[in-house]
Amino acid sequence: MNNKSQTGLKEQDITFPDKKDSEKFKTRVKRFYEFLNQKLNTSIYGEYAIFMNWGYEPDGNLNYAKVDLPEYFLNKRSTRLILELVGDCDLKGAKVLDVGCGRGGTLYTLSQFYQAKTLTGIDITDANIKFCRQNFDGEPIEFHKGDAENLPFADNEFDILTNVESSHVYPNLFKFYREVYRVLKPGGYFLYTDIFPNQELPNFLSYLQEVGLSLELDRDITSNVILSRELDAENQMGALAISEEETAENQEQEEDIQAHKHVMALPGSDLYERLKLQEYGYRIYRFKK
Ligand SMILES: C[S@@+](CC[C@H](N)C(=O)[O-])C[C@H]1O[C@@H](n2cnc3c(N)ncnc32)[C@H](O)[C@@H]1O
């Protein structure tokens, strides 16, 4: 397939403007996650900080998770997002790939609550993979370094592909979606959750369907994610000891500190307000190949 789709969509239509220089952008993303890992690994919470998603808090609307968590459960809202993502999808005996696995929280959750055959994670940031290999040593999970836009796997290899709050930083989503289709077996599922600019959603969906994936479930969970941010964001920020007064030793570090404040979506922050104003929406999708 070339980069112009049948409906006339071009790659540029869903590629964010600040990501046009793809390699430079990826280097910037990696640097940020290296910084975050260094912060986390030197915090007393390091080994428990296995998630980098914004979490899910039930709000009275229909929930899809088939597993109940006790009231006091470590990383409860981040875990809940994964349980909502899986919903009633049958993972028993499945070969699962998590793309953009971060510090392993998604795969660890799957290993605890479902009986997949194999669990494999891939992430572009060295420090994430290093942490995962050490922290989950002995768990039946494999971790590899790699790029979502160029997955180092054979065609038709996986039954399930998960992607959690990661795709919004891929410079070329077209490439990623084509890779999802390629590595999934026919009949396999793409379980996908992320933040999207609402105005561009039709473009994302058209292309996903055009690469051959059919939409089975579309949930707007923005209100659940906003609630989760209101309950957790400040504590998570505090746990990393990044305060309003924090001063950077150099320009790069200053950029990373600002980027971190931004991606935490603290109530009152620009991202939080954009979610509230419905400029951005947080979705859960299930596609079938
Ligand atoms: C917000 S974190 C989410 C991590 C994890 N999915 C979670 O929910 O905890 C985004 C992750 O995407 C990874 N990432 C960014 N660009 C990537 C790419 N092109 N290929 C693979 N991973 C990428 C980052 O290294 C980071 O670990």
Image: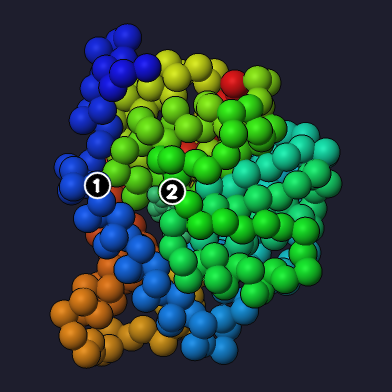
- Mark 1: few/some/many CA within 10 Å (<14, 14-19, 20+): some
Return the residue at label 1.
Answer: 22
Q: Could you tell me which secondary element the residue under label 2 belongs to?
A: loop
Residue pictured at 28% horizontal, 68% vertical:
259
Rounded to the nearest angstrom, the CA distance separating label 1 from label 2 is: 12 Å
| Left or right side of 255 for 123 | right
Residue 243 seen: yes
Residue that sits furthest to the top in the current view: 6
Q: Which numbered circle lies on residue 180?
A: none
Q: Is mark 1 within 8 Å of ligand 1?
A: no
In the image, what residue type sits under mark 1? Ser
Residue pictured at 42% horizontal, 36% vertical:
176
Return the residue at label 2.
Answer: 147
| Left or right side of 29 for 190 | right
Residue pictured at 18% horizontal, 85% vertical:
250
**Quadrant location of the N terminus?**
top left
For the image, the number of numbered tags is 2
Q: Quadrant of residue 7?
A: top left
Q: Quadrant of residue 206?
A: top left
Q: Could you tell me which secondary element the residue under label 1 belongs to?
A: helix
Q: Quadrant of ligand 1?
A: bottom left
**Nearest to the observer: residue 117 or residue 276:** 117
**Nearest to the observer: residue 205 or residue 273:** 205
In the image, what residue type sits under mark 2? Asp
Q: Earlier in the sequence, mark 1 or mark 2?
A: 1
Q: Where's residue 221, x and y in %?
A: 50, 43
Residue 227's place in the image compared with 63, above or below, is: below
| Left or right side of 71 for 26 | left
Q: Where's residue 187, x and y in %?
A: 68, 21
Residue 54 seen: no
Q: Where's residue 77, x and y in %?
A: 60, 61
Q: Where's residue 260, x and y in %?
A: 33, 70
